[in-house]
Structure formats: structure tokens, C-alpha cells
Image: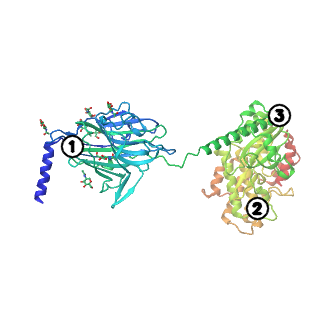
Amino acid sequence: MAPKTLFGLLIFLFLLVSSTALSFTFHGFNESNITREEKAKIDNQGRLELTRRENNIVGHAFYNESIKILDKNASVQPKVFSFSTCFVFSIVSPSAGPGGFGLAFTIAPSTRFPQAEGGHLLGLFNSLNDMNSSNHILVVEFDTVNGYKDATDTVGNHVGVNKNGMSSNISEPAAYFVDGKKEEFNMEKADAVCVWIEYDGETEILNLTVSPYLEPKPNKPLISQAVHIKSVMKESMFFGFSASTGKRKASAHYILGWSFALNGVAPPLDYALLPKPPPKEKHSQSFPWIKVIIGMLSALTFTLLCLFLYVTLYKRYMVFETLEDWEMDCPHRFRYRDLHLATKGFVESQLIGVGGFGSVYKGVLPRTGTEVAVKRILRTPAKGMREFAAEIESLGRLRHKNLVNLQGWCKQKNDLLLVYDYIPNGSLDSLLFSRSFVLDWNHRFRILKGVAAGLLYLHEEWEQVVIHRDVKSSNILIDGDFNAHLGDFGLARLYSHDKESHTTSVVGTIGYIAPELTRTGKASTSSDVYAFGVLLLEVVAGTRPVGSSDQFFLVDWVLENFQLGQILEVVDPKLDSIYEEEEVELVLKLGLLCAQNKAEYRPSIEQVTRYLNFDDPFPDISDCRYYDSQSSTTSLGFLEAMSTGKTSSSYSLPSIDRSTMSIEAGR
Ligand SMILES: *[C@@H]1O[C@H](CO)[C@@H](O)[C@H](O)[C@H]1NC(C)=O
Ligand SMILES: *[C@@H]1O[C@H](CO)[C@@H](O)[C@H](O)[C@H]1NC(C)=O
Ligand SMILES: *[C@@H]1O[C@H](CO)[C@@H](O)[C@H](O)[C@H]1NC(C)=O
Ligand SMILES: *[C@@H]1O[C@H](CO)[C@@H](O)[C@H](O)[C@H]1NC(C)=O
Ligand SMILES: *[C@@H]1O[C@H](CO)[C@@H](O)[C@H](O)[C@H]1NC(C)=O
Ligand SMILES: *[C@@H]1O[C@H](CO)[C@@H](O)[C@H](O)[C@H]1NC(C)=O
Ligand SMILES: *[C@@H]1O[C@H](CO)[C@@H](O)[C@H](O)[C@H]1NC(C)=O
């Protein structure tokens, strides 16, 4: 033990004194100590990029100081110093087509290689000086393309040791030993490749070991063979790398780290300190050019077809419908043609209702396939159409889940078409008074809350106050999930629009019209609340607001029962006493509070919403002050006025039919 240690120490001391011990390590690269020629560069991650993926280029990078490699003081004749090096390289070949051509660890007398060629010659030689002993270049090549001086190139994937040219003195497919077994691997596909080269100056044995990145260093070198390199070496040589791409084959070649030692063991690289291997291109079989061409051709055909269709349709449409300039600017404007198509030409079979302002047709829009309800309003005034449209444009921007959203409109001569979301289950009124179907309490309550939410949006949540003016059960549509959608909002206003304000006609439906409306004709959010109050009572009682006999008035009837302390007597018998008493009582009292004659005592819709959600305690309304002017005679008087047409005489629009329609609907 002791003599061995002593011997080692002596050798160490001898080496220290007798030879130039030099060593360096690069974990990633920067500009210092490296000379680069041709296309080699250092990327921002610190990788030394010898070539990028571009055809016909070469790149060189060398340690910038030459290293004295020949020991001229050897006793008989000069000998080569031992050296050891270790580096990590990475090749990124293109996803389509082959890559090439490889890189080489190079020992050369100069860092410049004038007239050197790329491709197989790796940027070190040209066809004239290849294998000429005056080159003095030792090459350890990592070649990815075979076939140098053969007829065809094949996948190379081999390592070799060459003297003065590209004909290998020693050559092996890339492989490494794991547990004594030789495993081949592909240097292009590996994330990176680790290389160890050790040369022993005494025995002239060169060991070459390669392994895929992050594998431990194999115990056995791939090549361990005597190579007489003395004839190749000059006294001082440059150590570094060279790489090249070819005419058609181009890979990017990177060095991630490098260590070197003269007369010693190269310091091992710490992989954690290296820059990340560059990302690989995903390999696919071959690039599907055919698919791309077919795709492009079909896209072109499709575009041409669309263009053709557009031009023809546009022409026909232009004949069909003349547009005024201002109409072009309205985003909610539909084409008459489309609506005509959607409703199959407004045929009777598509008719789903005759409402306050016109007939409603079901339709399916030709382009999008969406179901819509198209309301056709005949004989609208030609004059003032522009303001009319502006108003509808603004209503078209209203969006709420409890509204029947207006999708758009269209003008055809003097007819106006309004396009709404299609709501499948019909109106609340039809469900409530259906003979075959009983709307249960939970659904009724949910519907009422939905209507309140819709009104709240119109009154308070949208950018401007929208007064509905015609809240009633037949204007509430119910969807498949029993959600309420309030329809026809704001429309009433359109009808009084072109009239001067002081003669504004009363629009609404008998039984839902607040008393002050008949006096002032001024609709307000408060008159909407009145109508909503009537609706509350109607839904609980399952009774229309105005009876078939002129004597019956729902609000009065409920109030009477309330005052007698028997408010639950009014509940719809169809409910069969299955309901939440607390909710029913709240809705009835709230109905009375809303449908009282004095507008100033009616709650706001926001307050109504809070009561309905039990967010606020409901006030005591037994105070008769709220109802002091309420009497059946005034209500009936007002009703008579409406029925005899005194009020409706101020209609100038198709609303004469409309008012009778409304009266019918109200009953
Ligand atoms: C770079 O060169 C300088 C000067 O020759 C030297 O001091 C330094 O150690 C070298 N660095 C490396 C990493 O070899
Ligand atoms: C370059 O790298 C060397 C060693 O790797 C380091 O000492 C030096 O500071 C670096 N120089 C720059 C400019 O980053
Ligand atoms: C090599 O590079 C280092 C650091 O960049 C520099 O200090 C030194 O002078 C260079 N040596 C030669 C011979 O250029
Ligand atoms: C090599 O020999 C020369 C003279 O022949 C001498 O000056 C020099 O110091 C020697 N170098 C070594 C490293 O022994
Ligand atoms: C080798 O190169 C030298 C110098 O370039 C030249 O003189 C010589 O003829 C070449 N030898 C052969 C065999 O081509
Ligand atoms: C490799 O070199 C050795 C000695 O330098 C020689 O004997 C051998 O024939 C060479 N092998 C090839 C394949 O060139
Ligand atoms: C080269 O490899 C052989 C076989 O593994 C080993 O005995 C020898 O020490 C190695 N030489 C160097 C310089 O590492």
C-alpha cells in the first residue's frame, strides 16, 4: 500500500514538474477562450452552435490558445503528450427529410481551413487535400451520413478516428456498453451524446467512449486501440470542433459542454450546469405535401363557390329589396329573403300566435339553422321609419335570460318584421289556463321571480330605463325548463312614438293598466309595477284580471278577501292546496301592494325582487291608507272607457285591431 502511494505521488510530482499540465472546463459557452469561424455561434442559452439547419454551411470552434502537444525532450525521439477530453453534443435534424452531415473533434495546426468543403468533408478538407499527410489534422468524427465515396448516402450514425482526411482508420457504429452488453443508439435521435476521448502518450492507445446523454459513463470504451498520431501532430496544435451540412441534408450541431486536460484526466462535466439540449423536431414519416395541396385546392374551390353564391344571392336580393343608406349601418338588420325562407313564406302552418302587435311565425334561419320567432307587423308608418329602426336597434342590444331577446329586424315596404329567440313552451297565459295541464306552485313562483328579474333588468340594470308598458301573462313565454321570458318589451313605445307627447295614446291591456295611465297617459316604471302586481295575483289565483262579467275585477276581489282575513281563499283551486303557504301569502300581498292605485306607494321593481327572494321582511299592509281611493267603480269606469273606444280613438296605427286583440288577450 505504502509503496504504491509513494509511486503515485512521485508520478504526480514528475508530471507537475516535467510537463505542462493544462486543463479547462466549459459548462456552456460564452465569448471567452473560444475562437469561432464560419457559421459557428453561441446561442443565448450558452450552447455552442456549430451549424444551424441550413444547407451547405460549415462551422468551426476551437479553444483559442494552441496547446503544446509534442514532448521534444523525450530521450530518444519526440512523443505525444497524453490528453483527455470529454464533451456533450446534440444534433437536431429536420422533421422532414434527412439530416447531415455530422461533427468532428478536431486537432489541427490552425483554426482556419481555407477551401475546405462541407458535406462529407465536415468543413476540414477538400477533394484535393483529403488524406494528404501535409494536412496534420486528427479527426474523431461523429458522422450521421454514410456513403462517402460510395454511390449513395445512407444513415451513417458511426464514430471514427481519421488521420489527415475523411477515410477512417478506425470506425464503429455508435454504441455503448451497459453491463458488458453493447447497445447501439442513434446519435441524431438522442437528446444529446456524451463523449470521452483519452489518449495515452506512452502506449499510443486511444480510448473513445460515447453514451446517450445522462447515462453514466460506460466502463468499457467503444474503441480502445493503438493509433500512431505522432506523425500527424505538430509541436503546438489547436483543439476544437468542426461541423458541416450538405446540399440537401442539414442538421443543427451543438456542443453543450467541454472539458480538457493535458497529461491528466479531463474534469468530469456536471450535467446540471450544462445548457439544456436544444428541442428536437418531431419526426414524422414524411411531410404530407399531397394532403396540403389537396387541402389548398379544396379551400380555393370552396372560396370560389362561396363568392359565386354570394354574388348571385346578393344580386337577387338587391332586386328583391331596396335598401336605404342608413339601413346599411344597422347590425341587427335581417334580410327579408332570409326571413321569407325561414318561415316558408309566412305560411299559415308556421303561425304560432297572433299577439298584440301582429302575427308570430316560427322559423329556422337558413344559414345558421337557429330557431326564431318572427313577428310580422303590418302597415307600420313609412314616415319616421328611421327613428323606428334606431329604437329597435337599441332594443336589439338588450340581453337577459328572462327576456325574449330581440335578435333583429327587417323592413319590407311598410311591414316590419321582428326576429326573436324562439321559446318552445308557449305563453304563461296558455299554461295557466290550460284545461289539461296544471302548472304547479313551484313553477309558478319561479316564473314570477324570473319575470321580476327581467323587469329589473329593463328598469334598472340596462344602460337606459326601458318601460315595458305591456306586462301581462300572454306576453310571458315559458321555455322547456319553465324559465320565464318576458316578451314584447319596449314595443308599445314604438307605437306612440310618432305622436306628439301630449297626445300619447294609452297602450296596454285592460286589467293591467294602472289607473294614472288613463289620466296622464304617461307610462312609467311604476305603471309596469302595477301590471306586474296584477300578474302576481293572476298567477296565484289562476283567474284572469278582468272577469267575463263586467262586475269582476281581480284586484278588488283579492283585496276584499284580504280585508276579511281569508286571503288564501283566492288561491287557484287547481293547485289542490299543494303550495307553500308562506310564499303564496307573500305573493298575494305583494300583488296588492304593487297593484294599488297610488303610484307613489308602489314599491320599485328592485324592492319587489327583494321581497320575492325573502331578502327583506314584507311590511304590514293592513293599513288601509294604501287603498283609500281603490274602489270597483273607478276601475269599472276606466274599463268602460276603454271598451267603448274613447281612449283607443287616439291610436293612429294598426292598433285599432290591436286594442280589440288586447282586450281579448286580457280576458
Ligand atoms: C480563458 O483564458 C484565460 C487567459 O488565457 C485563462 O486565464 C482562463 O483560465 C481561461 N478560461 C478557461 C475556462 O479556460
Ligand atoms: C465566461 O465563462 C467563464 C467560465 O465559464 C467565466 O469565468 C466568465 O466570467 C464568463 N464571461 C462572461 C462575459 O460571461
Ligand atoms: C483567449 O481568450 C481569453 C479570454 O477571452 C483571452 O484573455 C486571451 O487573450 C485569448 N488568447 C488568445 C491567444 O487570443
Ligand atoms: C527541454 O530541453 C530543453 C533543452 O534541450 C530545456 O531547455 C528545457 O528545459 C527542457 N524542458 C523540459 C520540460 O524538460
Ligand atoms: C499534398 O499537399 C501538398 C501541399 O499542398 C502538395 O504539394 C502535394 O502534392 C500533395 N500530395 C498529394 C499526394 O496530393
Ligand atoms: C490504421 O492505422 C494503423 C497504424 O497507424 C494501420 O496499421 C492500419 O492499417 C490503419 N487502418 C486503417 C483501416 O486504415
Ligand atoms: C483505455 O481503456 C482500457 C480498457 O478499458 C483501459 O485499460 C485503459 O486504462 C484506458 N486508457 C486510458 C488512457 O484511460
> For the residue labelled by badge 2, is the local secondary structure a helix, a strand or a loop?
helix
| Label placed on residue 225 | none
Mark 3 and ligand 2: say if the CB distance to the nearest ligand atom is below 8 Å: no
**Residue behind mark 3:** 319
Mark sitting on residue 541: 2
Q: CA distance from mark 3 to mark 2?
A: 54 Å
From the viewer's perspective, tell me whether residue 652 is left or right of residue 245.
right
Q: Nearer the viewer, mark 3 or mark 1?
A: 1
* Distance from Cα at disc 3 to Cα at disc 1: 96 Å
Above or below, 440 against 514 in this view is below
User: Of callouts 3 and 1, which one flags the residue occurring earlier in the amino acid sequence?
Assistant: 1
Q: Please report the residue visible at 28 percent of the width from the left and 51 percent of the height from the top.
A: 225
Residue tagged 1: 81
Report the front residue among 358 and 458: 358
Which comes before the other along the chain, label 2 or label 1? 1
Residue 348, how many percent across, how many down? Answer: 87, 50
Look at the picture and state if 80 lies above or below 544.
above
Q: Using the rendered view, name the quadrant where residue 558 is placed.
A: bottom right
**Residue 524: x, y in percent?**
72, 44
Dot 3 or dot 2: first in sequence order is 3
The x and y percentages for residue 637 are 84, 50
The answer to whether residue 393 is left or right of residue 124 is: right
Give 293 or 29, whichever is nearer the viewer: 293
Residue 407's image quarter?
top right
Q: Amino acid at mark 2?
A: Ala
